[in-house]
Amino acid sequence: MRGIIKSGSITSGGEMNSVQGPRVIAVTSGKGGVGKTNITLNLAMALSSLGQRVVIFDADLGMANVEVLLGVNPRYTLFDFLYNNKSLYEIITPGPNNIKLISGGSGLLELANLSQRAIKQLRDTVNHFDVGADIILVDTGAGINKNVLAFVGAAQEVIVVATPEPTSITDAYGLIKVLASYNVHREVNLVVNKVDKEREAKETYHKLEVTARHFLINTKIRYLGSVKEDVNVVKAVRDQQPFMLYQPDCAASQSIKDLAAELLGNDSKDQGGFSGFFTRLTRLFS
């Protein structure tokens, strides 16, 4: 694993500060089933409503979860860019509310085990391509496999999604601990999903923050916010549309709007945009 992310080699998104570009934010989780992809999608919708140009990069490679939740069928995916000579422009799929999607495709072993050559190809192309975004949300897989760690490590910022369940808290801490051990991100944003009350979310944050403060000296956990448990989320998933569209005024939608506002109020220092992201990704896979 040290060969994938070298300890101390890249911190907080690396050294690419000279090239202006969008904020690249990885959204990840310590385990599956916590609603990570749904939060990514609806956060994109909320950010777009606030005037941001948003692209979702589905980096849960080979799974295509974002397109399933959106109910879209991209004509081309990342697989076509890497193996069928399609341009980056051709694999961008328009979505609702002016968001855009770069799909990772589904059921493709080649994408699930992305090579350094493929990453370099993406980097070299992006260096000469304007994706037309203010914010790029990178929806990673769950857990701590090499693809997840590399995508999270390459992003400028990271959001970890957890729920109040003990197993989710444990897995979220495990992920944050691994990131800390590789000195990848010194600040991690926490979103607590599926909460009944805000107090429940704050208690979850407190458990993680206290543990991190004692054992992870160089890593700070920042509470970004929570998303309420809401039956409309399940209904929207079944209808294959973002719950921000399905029920814009429901509790979960309001939670997402608050998250988007908080995120915009915490603008990060630019670190090379999308091209910088793939440059760092190449290093992490080397």
Image (cartoon, rainbow, N blue to C red):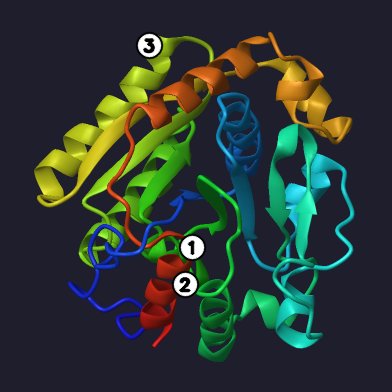
Q: Secondary structure at mark 3?
A: helix
**Which circle, 3 or 2, is nearer the viewer?**
2
252, above or below 79, in the image: above
125, above or below 271, in the image: below
117, above or below 160, in the image: below
Q: Nearer the viewer, residue 50 or 34?
A: 50
Q: Earlier in the sequence, mark 3 or mark 1?
A: 3
Task: Kindly identify the amino acid type of the residue bearing the numbered disc 2.
Answer: Phe
- Which disc, if any, is residue 212? none
Q: Residues within 10 Å of mark 3 (few under 14, many from 20)?
A: few
Instruction: Check disc 3 and report the residue beneath it.
Output: 199
Task: Kindly identify the amino acid type of the residue bearing the numbered disc 3.
Answer: Arg
Estimate the spatial distance between the alpha carbons at disc 3 and disc 1, rounded to whole Å: 36 Å
Is residue 122 rendered to the left or right of residue 279? right
Q: Residues within 10 Å of mark 1 (few under 14, many from 20)?
A: many
Q: Secondary structure at mark 2?
A: helix
Is residue 232 rendered to the left or right of residue 154? right
The structure residue drawn at horizontal position 56% and vertical position 23%, both measured from the top left corner, is 256
Residues tagged 3 and 2 counted as in contact (Cβ below 8 A): no
Estimate the spatial distance between the alpha carbons at disc 3 and disc 2, rounded to whole Å: 38 Å
Q: What is the quadrant of the N terminus in the image?
A: bottom left
Q: What is the quadrant of the C terminus in the image?
A: bottom left
Instruction: Check disc 1 and report the residue beneath it.
Output: 274
Residues tagged 1 and 2 counted as in contact (Cβ below 8 A): yes
Q: Nearer the viewer, residue 171 or 275?
A: 275
- Which disc, if any, is residue 278? 2
The structure residue drawn at horizontal position 71% and vertical position 65%, both measured from the top left corner, is 104
